[in-house]
Image (spheres, rainbow, N blue to C red):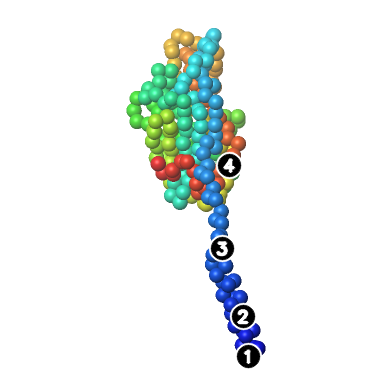
Amino acid sequence: MKTRAVLALSAIIATGLSAGAANAVVKKPKPLPPVCNLITDAPGDTGIGVLTAAPSAPVPDDSLDVVSADIASDATYATAVIRVKALAASDPQAVGGRTYFFEFNAPGADANVLFFGASLPTTGANTFEWGDITNTAGQDNLNNKGAAVGAIVGNEIHISVALKDLKAAGVKFDKGSKISNLSVTTGNLVGLAPGNPADNTTPAGPFYGYEAFTLDSAVGTKAYTAAALSCVKPGK
């Protein structure tokens, strides 16, 4: 009888513990917020400089004035988004068109800077590409590796590259890969003006005319972890 009573008491205690464990509240970790604005830049810091005998003062150009930028990826695409102050349909200050580059380093291509680029010409279709940048004798060379998918969304330039294309070139965008040294540059190129000599020379001889350019640049201080949740939707 004594043994049975002890067994019964043990059963009651075990049952009570089981009920308590079932009613315990397990706290789930809070989900990480999406990363956004990995690159930021104060507006109003861009302008045009005309390379003539007497360069003109800088003139603001909102279409090339970077305010922020991001890069994001999923299992299919890597997408860079460059945001400017106000992207106009046409830019009279950019006679030859406008260019936008998102630059970064990624595993598998550590030696060279990679870029996702967009060109918005004065006439003709917009073009989007990706590649790397090599430096020879102090001169940066942009090497096109392939076409990208692009879109203009309000004041944003979206540039997407398929991960399979990056992988084929040895670039690793696998989940968890660190995408670092993020930066953005924007600019334009104006055609030559006959009879207006510039203070410039080329290996082929004197360069006559003028070259006007607008440039803005911004550098990020954070890296992006591939496949991390972002305010940018990859592929869009």
Question: Which residue is disc 2 drawn over?
Answer: 9
Q: Residues within 10 Å of mark 3 (few under 14, many from 20)?
A: few
Which residue bears the numbered disc 4?
A: 223
Q: Secondary structure at mark 1?
A: loop
Specify which label sits upstream in the sequence, 3 or 1.
1
Q: Which residue is tagged 1? A: 1
Q: Which residue is mark 3?
A: 24
The answer to which of 114 and 230 lies nearer the viewer is 230
Relative depth, front residue between 203 and 77: 77
Does residue 140 appear in the picture of this structure?
Answer: no
Quarter of the image for the N terminus: give it.
bottom right
**Residue 154, how many percent across, how many down?**
39, 30
* Whole-number angstrom distance, CA of label 3 to CA of label 4: 39 Å
Element under disc 4: loop
Which of disc 4 and disc 3 is earlier in sequence? Answer: 3
Is the residue marked by circle 1 packed among few (<14), some (14-19), or many (20+) residues within 10 Å? few
Instruction: Give the number of the mark in front: 3 or 4.
Output: 3
Distance between the alpha carbons at the discs numbered 1 and 2: 12 Å
| Residue beneath the point at 45% across and 51% down | 75
The kind of residue on which mark 4 rests is: Ala
- Tag 1 near tag 2, CB within 8 Å: no
Viewer-nearest of labels 3 and 2?
2
Query: What type is the residue that disc 2 sits on?
Result: Leu
Q: Which quadrant of the structure image shows residue 45?
A: top right
Query: Are the residues flagged by discs 1 and 4 in contact, CB closer than 8 Å?
Result: no
In this rendering, does residue 227 appear at all?
yes
